[in-house]
Each structure stands twice: as structure tokens, then as C-alpha cells.
Amino acid sequence: MSRQSNRTTDSKKMNSELFTLTYGALVTQLCKDYENDEEVNKQLDKMGYNIGVRLIEDFLARSSVGRCQDFRETADVIAKVAFKMYLGVTPSVTNWSPAGDEFSLILESNPLVDFVELPDNHSNLVYSSLLCGVLKGALEMVQMAVDVRFAQDTLRGDSVTEIRMKFIKRIEENVPAGDE
């Protein structure tokens, strides 16, 4: 019985490491293909957005989470369910703005940056900006426009990774005439 448990743990660790290394290869190739870090950041964000647009369907089907009532509930679902499900980490939700429209996700460890050191000539690279795009794309599919950016990053010497999320607006569903 314990042997099976060890295999499952080893398999998850191998999958996680494979994903981390594959992502590293992707970022390395983008750095070779584009002139500057800002363009690489844009490409990672765009790729993440496209992943998020598709990933939300899988998330809703697997998690059986219903529609969130407010932005605070959305933040908790992202941190406690989505990050745990897909990255195996649970960030803390902190630093709420007084208006309640902005918060931070604090990651003690970012699984995307295992085995990574940024070279000096890539000081403007936001290595994990794919995550920002995933969050934007997924939330847009559930009618939420958000701004997502990295405020702190352990790859830049910060003690934690901080993703800052700001609610922009609720997107109204456009129902074609006659489909009401």
C-alpha cells in the first residue's frame, strides 16, 4: 500500500519537474527569438491568456465551484482551489485595497522558478508572467476584467513572489438578438 503512495508522490514530483523544465525551455527559446525582455514578457502574457481562456472550463468542471458572489470570494477560490489544483501551492491573499477591488497573492514558493537563475542581461524579464495571462484569460471567461502584474519576484531577490490583481469591471454578456 505504501509503495503505491510513494509512486503517486514520485509521479507528481516528476510531472512538476518536467513542467518546470519545459517552461524554462520555452522562456529560453522566447529570449532567443525576441530582441528584448519586454517583448518576451508580452509573449508570455499572451500565451498565458490563451491558456487561461481554455483552462477555466477544465477548472469549473473539476472543481465544481459555483459563481463567486464578489471579488473577495474570487480571490479565495483562485488561491485555495485553482493554484492548489494546477501548481500545487496555496498562496495567501493579502494587501486588500480599502475599496476592496485590489489584492495580492503571496507565493512563498513559485514552482515555475525551481532550477532558475536570471542572467544579468535579462534584468527586465518577468519570468513567470505566463501566470498573469492565465489569470486574466480565465477571469475574462467568467465576465471579470482584471489587471494582473508581478509586484515582487524571488528571482529578483525579493523574499516572496507577489502577484497583484485589480478588478477593472464586470463584463456584460452580449446576447445576440433573438437568443434572449
Image (cartoon, grey):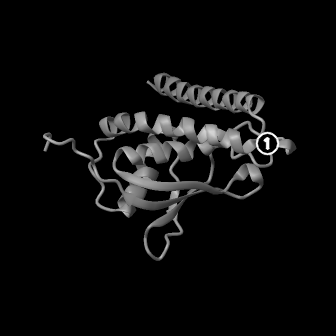
- What residue is drawn where x is 49% and y is 61%? 166
- What residue is drawn where x is 45% and y is 43%? 137
Amino acid marked by disc 1: Leu
Q: Is residue 75 above or below residue 117?
A: below
Q: Is residue 31 left or right of residue 18?
A: right
Q: Quadrant of the C terminus?
A: top left
Q: Nearer the viewer, residue 176 or 24?
A: 176
Q: Is residue 32 left or right of residue 110?
A: right
| Res 24 visible | yes
Name the residue furthest front.
177
Q: Nearer the viewer, residue 34 or 65?
A: 34
- Give percent across and percent down for residue 57: 35, 35
Name the residue furthest right.
120
Q: Quadrant of the N terminus?
A: top left
Q: Which residue is mark 1?
A: 118
Check disc 1 and report its element: helix, strand or loop: loop
- Give percent across and percent down for residue 68: 30, 55
Q: Is residue 24 above or below residue 85?
A: above
